[in-house]
Image (cartoon, helix red, strand yellow):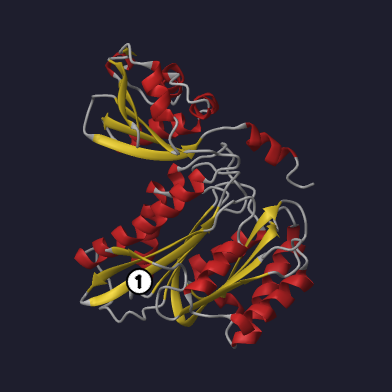
Amino acid sequence: MQEIHGGVTAAKGFTAIGVAAGIKKDRKDMAMIYSEAECRVAGTFTTNVVKAAPIKWDQDIVYGNKTARAVVVNSGVANACTGAEGFGYCRETAEKAAELFGIEANQVLVASTGVIGQQIPIDKIKAGVEKMKQLLSGSAAAGTLAAEAIMTTDTVKKEIAVEVEIGGKTVTLGGMSKGSGMIHPNMCTMLSFVTTDACISQKLLQKALSASVADSYNMISVDGDTSTNDTCLLLANGQAGNPEITAEDEDYAKFAEALNYVNTCLAKRMAADGEGATKLFEVKVVGAESKEQAVTLAKSVVSSSLTKAAIYGRDANWGRILCAMGYSGAQFDPEKVDLYFESAAGRLKIIEDGVSTGYSEEEATRILSEDAVTAIADIKTGDAGATAWGCDLTYDYVKINADYRS
């Protein structure tokens, strides 16, 4: 497997574009992905009981139709808490795209992100669909425009592509995502779209995605808020020409590994781009009795506001980490825990068997001053582990969310 230049247009048969449709002022705000061939589709969605209209529309397709050709995305308005009218606008959007492409409306997935509670400007949405139909391209630049168009408070675009050999053929996976605030494990306020030219059964496509999401998107947290619009969609059009993957064999393992690489990279970029963030904060729990125990502990630490504030202040306040592990609900012996801080500046053991090592505060501050910082907790009870990603908590997070609508 190797990383290549590109995003959602990297795989054979996929085109995309991003445009300004007038939903937001002077910014790109609509994106489209289109496949020349019918795609098998898989998806995962928010666990929030309050689900946006596009979630309900897409779930019908992913769980029912299981095939798709196009994805239409808007940013600026979430189309959440909009009732029957909002769901009707999903249908109108899909019908407009279906009319232009000569396909069925239930082959068009839709997604929205932005302010909750407002109805989407359907006339602008439909005009945007027409505009994008004329501009679709398979170029890497077009994929980048799509990645930029789905951003809300994101400060950077997020896209990636990889190639892997499967069945003697080169299979490509490309993805883009958005997410900066309202990010918390269990499918965060994020949109993620992955395209691939792999030939794989729908059942295994969904299995690979669900497994990958558990170890990638569901292991990030910015602020503890799980959104109404979380969506991850995976489309496979089979254009690579590899023998169809129908069993959990070596070919499936290669595909799953490549998919997880794409999703993990996108997840980490979202965590690093948390609203107001200055650094990526990674938490590794090792030596656990089970993966479940490690996941619970890692999530608790990466979600701790006090810990995140300490990371921002470059303060090796390790008591906050041990405290977050203690209230996580996972059982462990705090008097066995070793804790390290690590970054490009080095690695430092902070506590051993639950007590301070007498470490140098100056050395700890130097390590915590890098753009990416890792806390490693070894609980010394087994061989399992898990990794979670988040960011520091800064003054700017409050400023961004205090005037998000205004």
**Res. 319 image quadrant:** top left
Residue at mark 1: 172
**Res. 370 image quadrant:** top left
**Res. 384 image quadrant:** top left
Is 301 or 243 nearer to us in this picture? 301
- The secondary element bearing badge 1 is classed as strand
* Left or right: 207 as drawn, with respect to 221: left
Residue 232 shows in this picture:
no
Image position, residue 227 (x, y; %): 60, 47
Count neighbours of disc 1 (C-alpha within 10 A) and say few if under 14, some if 14 to 19, many if 20 or more: many
Residue 53 shows in this picture:
yes
* Left or right: 257 as drawn, with respect to 232: left
* Left or right: 197 as drawn, with respect to 280: left
Figure check: 156 above or below 107: above
Q: Residue furthest bottom?
A: 102
Image position, residue 308 (x, y; %): 51, 29
Image position, residue 223 (x, y; %): 57, 37
